[in-house]
Image (cartoon, rainbow, N blue to C red):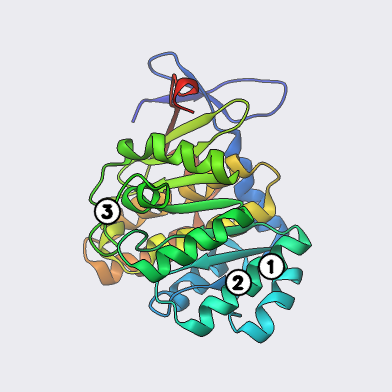
Amino acid sequence: MPRTVAEKNPSNLHLVRTSEGIVVDLSFLRAHDAVRDTAPLIQCLTNKVVSNISANALLAIGASPAMVDTPDESQDFAKIASGVLINCGTPNSEQYDGMREAIAGATAAGNPWVLDPVGAGGLQKRTEFMHEVLPQRPTAIRGNASEIIALAGTGAGGRGVESTDGVEAALEPALKLSRETGAVIGVSGPTDLIVQAGERPRAVSLESGHPMLQNVIGTGCSLGALCAAYLAAWEDPFAAIIAAHAHVGAAGSVAAEKSSAPGFFAVAWLDALHELSTDGIKKRISASEVADIAGLS
């Protein structure tokens, strides 16, 4: 990672100058403090494998989780929640209906909601559901490269929940998906990619994390929950999604310094989510804007 030094600026933004002389705006990290200050209430309609992990991750960053996913209650709760996560990891018919109700409630209340398209393209039923809800304009979509490519209609999906595509291959599909839905797109991988189409298309490449994050169940799905919390706490959705990815990745690098085995790593990662300060995250990430994307959108 390039050496960085703080830049003085009147707006109190997190500007840093790399050793190559490139000034990078890290003001999105202010969203980290906003989550602590506001303690957003996040409704998670998520898969049964990661429910406990996602709830603990939200608590660790200062948010409040609520696993309300039944059709009878989801819409009403989504109206009072600060943000909603829709994770399609292990859905059944009742949960599909609960997700539809939660999306309706969040939309009616103007609350942000995140779609995590787990296994998109690989299984017909869930892929049909994802395409059904896309017109309801999620605030953000977070997935791996193969899931984003499949959801954009330009690929067939990965191997189960594992990506078989590189993050760089998802840039154009992510821009297409963002343009069609209005969502910020987060593509997770060895290097994360956050994309937003619009009048001025934006894409940021984020280096953080550690390979051990791939060896622990629930880190990616928990990132979807954290994206909902950051969206609830910060007014700029693009900055919020970058900040959520930075927090999860930085915590991964801290955890890897303390443990090389998955079990201890999982605990250390959760502790790091809780303990990391804004400055601590800034020291462990490298962010850069992706150039020349206007022609792709």
Q: In the image, 193: left or right of 82?
A: left
Q: Nearer the viewer, mark 2 or mark 3?
A: 2
> Pointer 2 and pointer 1: residues touching (CB < 8 Å)?
yes
The numbered dot on residue 104 is: 1
Q: Inspect the image, locate mark 2, and give the three-letter code of the amino acid beneath it.
A: Arg
Q: Residue at x 57, y 73 (%)?
A: 99
Quadrant containing the N terminus in the rendered view: top left
Disc 2 element: helix
Q: Inspect the image, locate mark 1, and give the three-letter code of the amino acid beneath it.
A: Ala
Pointer 3: what residue? 163
The numbered dot on residue 15 is: none
Q: Nearer the viewer, mark 1 or mark 3?
A: 1
Q: In the image, 4: left or right of 169?
A: right
Q: In the image, 254: left or right of 137?
A: left
> Pointer 1 and pointer 3: residues touching (CB < 8 Å)?
no
Expressed as whole percent of the image width and height from the top left, the position of residue 250 reads 42, 48
Between residue 147 and residue 5, name the one nearer to us: 147
Q: Is residue 37 visible?
A: yes
Q: Residues within 10 Å of mark 2 (few under 14, many from 20)?
A: many
The numbered dot on residue 100 is: 2
Q: Residues within 10 Å of mark 3 (few under 14, many from 20)?
A: many
Q: Residue at x 69, y 29 (%)?
A: 12
Alpha-carbon distance for marks 2 and 3? 26 Å
Alpha-carbon distance for marks 1 and 3? 30 Å
**First in sequence: mark 2 or mark 3?**
2
Between residue 148 and residue 131, name the one nearer to us: 131
**First in sequence: mark 1 or mark 3?**
1
